[in-house]
Image (tube, rainbow, N blue to C red):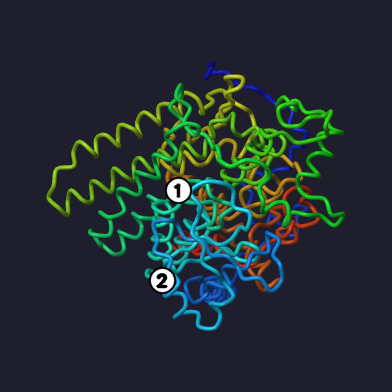
Amino acid sequence: MKPDAVVNSSQLSSASSSVDSSADLESAANSTSTCKSSYPTAEQIAAVRKYINRTWRTLRRGHDHILTAARDSKVEHESGRSWPVYISAKEDPEAVADTLRRTMSAEFSRIRIETLPEQGEIEDHGLLYLPGDYIVPGGRFNELYGWDSYFILLGLLQDNQLEMAKSLTDQLLYQVVHYGTVLNANRTYFLGRSQPPLLANMVLKIYARTQDADWLRSTLPTLIEYYDYWMVEPHLDKESGLSRFYASGEGPAPEVIVSEVDEEGRTHFDRIREFYKHESIEDYDVSLFYNEQADKLTDLFFKGDRSMRESGFDPTNRFGPFSVDIVHYLPVCLNVLLHMMEQDIAEVYRALSKIEKADYAVEIKGWQHKALLREQSINKYLWDESEGLYLDYYLTTGERHYYEFATTFYPLWAGVASKEQAAAVVEHLVKFEAPGGVRTSTQTSGNQWDDPFGWAPLQLIAVKGLGRYGYHEEAKRLAKRFITLVVDDFERSGSLLEKYDLETCSGEVSDEIQYGYSSNEIGFGWTNGVVLELLAILEQ
């Protein structure tokens, strides 16, 4: 492998416009965008806070909402048939049924309890049982999502809803014990597919509020089990010591076939086949993913598609068109989060050593050493000195893949970057800064995880990363831009949304999205959480 090389790929996309990094809200508003120039008033912000507080209640799911949670618009369902709710083999089906029967009363007849089979495919997909309350993102996303939950938790804690935040975390811990990992979400078609790992940091944030040592101690085996999920093949690349996204399961993702259909009746996969038939691609060997003679997508395509969904960035052209080549990449985001997890588990041991007056020095040193080794590998494989960016590493070529993406701010957020590396990344801020906040990427591809679309989690990560290295003016400017966008759109739509167009500062995005689902869901869990976090930063 050649870790010091860079590959410049042709991305079949156009570079987006950028806003000068020194621009203020007014100059951004005076560009071609429709963004407001003035920061929201206290009354406008109060209205958004009230909406968020109210929305937590409507997004809550628990035993008294099992039927609501069991309903799923993303799969076919025969009218009048009961909705399946699956439990793990470790659960007692009669005990679960008795609990739900008491809670649901007459509605219990509209669900049926099934035990997950140990092997074989599940044909009748359904909800995966969780014993406690949790928050769903909203809209078509009517289940507990992995990395969404981290940003939702931040909002719950800002809203002083500690009990709900702890229950949310407990459900993710339960998933690891009963379903093998923190799932993409708690439906059977998500089994074997995780999402960006943030659970250990959630545990520490809950412990910081509760100081519940018994609870903290109980989480440790589960956190280590979840860490191990990412540290064995096929997730682990042994040569580099870094990890990749690699979901299990074969064939088309079931939720895509029904729910990602355009006005012409074409699925997301149909549109991709058309693209492969008529477009030339330089980013990867298309024959790995598309059989031209048979006009069929290959097994590896569907493996890559599932793995792209495990990454949380679905879809983008970051790993080539539609990111199906993701299985051959070591991503910046995943490895920075695993570095955070190693540090967080060391911190759990450190906290327990203080409480129990026990000697966990070996464990603390061991996890710190893991973090140090990963930091060295991140610098070796993912940092590009000549470009001044963190870039994903392409195993196929042994080179870094040049695609400017907001995950370059992750190492700043996690404290992995040196002061010099952080300064180099900040030099590129001009490319990422839009009238409405931080661009997902600098490329326009028709995918929702590319320009001009902006997502709440990436705003917070960039803002906190900049602030961590002393770039407070830049951080607050970006925070103000996103808050201004969200509040302005809230006054038009009455809702907080999943994503926004950062150029027009609007939630009206459906006409611009060509692949995947084009809807913009209301709620919205992680936007709620990030807005409250950014407001807290701005009010400091």
Residues tagged 2 and 1 counted as in contact (Cβ below 8 A): no
At x 78%, y 28%, the residue is 281
Q: Is residue 319 visible?
A: yes
Residue 38 x, y percent position in the rendering: 64, 64
Q: Is residue 157 visible?
A: no
Crowding around mark 2 (Cα neighbors within 10 Å: few <14, some 14 to 19, many 20+) is some
Q: Give the structural element (helix, strand or loop) at label 1.
A: loop
At x 68%, y 66%, the residue is 489
* Residue type pointed to by label 1: Thr
Residue 452 x, y percent position in the rendering: 71, 48
Would you say 447 lies left or right of 137 here? right
Q: Which residue is mark 2?
A: 161
Q: Which residue is mark 1?
A: 181
- Identify whether 440 is placed above or below 401: below
The mark that comes first in sequence, 2 or 1, is: 2
Q: Given this view, does label 2 or label 1 mark the residue nearer the observer?
A: 1
Q: Nearer the viewer, residue 401 or 310?
A: 310
Q: Give the structural element (helix, strand or loop) at label 2.
A: loop
Residue 361 x, y percent position in the rendering: 18, 38
Crowding around mark 1 (Cα neighbors within 10 Å: few <14, some 14 to 19, many 20+) is many
- Identify whether 7 is placed above or below 532: above
Residue 506 x, y percent position in the rendering: 72, 61
The answer to which quarter of the image holds residue 16 is top right
- Which residue, as the protein is rendered here, is positioned at the far left? 357
Give the Cα separation between the discs numbered 2 and 1: 25 Å
Q: Nearer the viewer, residue 288 or 100?
A: 100
Q: Nearer the viewer, residue 475 or 207?
A: 207
